[in-house]
Amino acid sequence: MSQRVRGIGMTSERTRLRMVERLRSAGVRDTGVLAAMAEIPRHIFVDDALASRAYDDVSLPLGHGQTISHPLTVARMCELVRAARPLGRVLEIGTGCGYQAAVLSRIAREVFSVERIAALLEQARVHILRELRLRNVRMKHADGRDGLPEAAPFDAIVIAAAAPEAPSALIDQLAPGGRMVLPLGNEKQRLCLIERSAAGVIDCMLEEVHFVPLRAGTLR
Ligand code: SAH
């Protein structure tokens, strides 16, 4: 493992384990998610100049006007879609730097992640495939509002950008019993959990969050 991945000081494993302890204190119960976040080096996903803040309880800028999600938000979204069961295929919309895709790769058999900004996706590929060698993550440059019909259905779908309503193409790509979590709203947003059950599609609104908007089309 390279020195950069291993980390030192504010990017060391000890710092990461302290972050995981704070997640536990904040109410994250899923031990699979906590173990995944203890394993994935969050600091390699941010700019070197910000690496010493990678384990703080904050979201950080990624460039291109995007942000890496707050650690507690990543943990909550993973815990909500996992619902303490083994996950087969998972779809993430909004790869960004790739951190959440890396965490998901530890709690799911296969992860598909879609990003509309090609430059961000290229960076995410370097972190996930070259530096961490996570072999169960596939990434695609596309507008994620259409989902990924060629790989559907999914046991879980995580949307990392806010929309006024859940894209219907994505609800259709949920497997029976599948769960989707996404931020809903514009200025004021809440996490929304959607479940495809035998009785139909049910949803519930949870805590307030702050995400960048889900946008149409792709960018180089
Ligand atoms: N998952 C990231 C957070 C990414 S921020 C993490 O681990 O921290 C949200 C990302 O969603 C941005 O990179 C943005 O470019 C992307 N995004 C916004 N609209 C999108 C769309 N329609 N399809 C795919 N990605 C989108």
Image: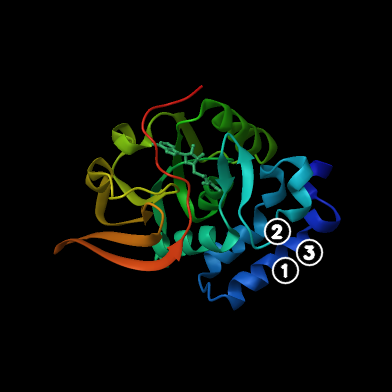
Residue under pointer 2: 55
Asked if labels 3 and 1 touch by Cβ distance under 8 angstroms, the answer is yes
Marks 2 and 1, how far apart at CA: 8 Å
Residue at screen point 50% across, 56% down: 107
Classify mark 3: residues with Cα within 10 Å, few (<14), some (14-19) or many (20+): some
In this figure, which residue is indicated by the disc labeled 3?
14
Q: Is residue 196 left or right of residue 72?
A: left
Q: Quadrant of residue 20?
A: bottom right
Mark nearer the N terminus (2 vs 1): 1
Q: Amino acid at mark 3?
A: Arg
Q: Which mark is residue 18?
A: 1
- Say whether residue 15 is left or right of residue 32: right
Q: Nearer the viewer, mark 3 or mark 2?
A: 2
Q: Amino acid at mark 2?
A: Tyr
Quarter holding the N terminus is top right
User: What x and y, as percent, mark residue 217?
Assistant: 38, 28
Residue 59 occupies quadrant: bottom right
- Is the CB of the residue bearing disc 2 within 8 angstroms of ligand 1? no
The picture places residue 62, in percent across and down from the top left corner, at 62, 41
Residue 137 against residue 210 in the figure, above or below: above
Determine whether, in the image, residue 98 is placed left or right of residue 87. Answer: right
Residue 22 appears in which quarter of the rendering? bottom right
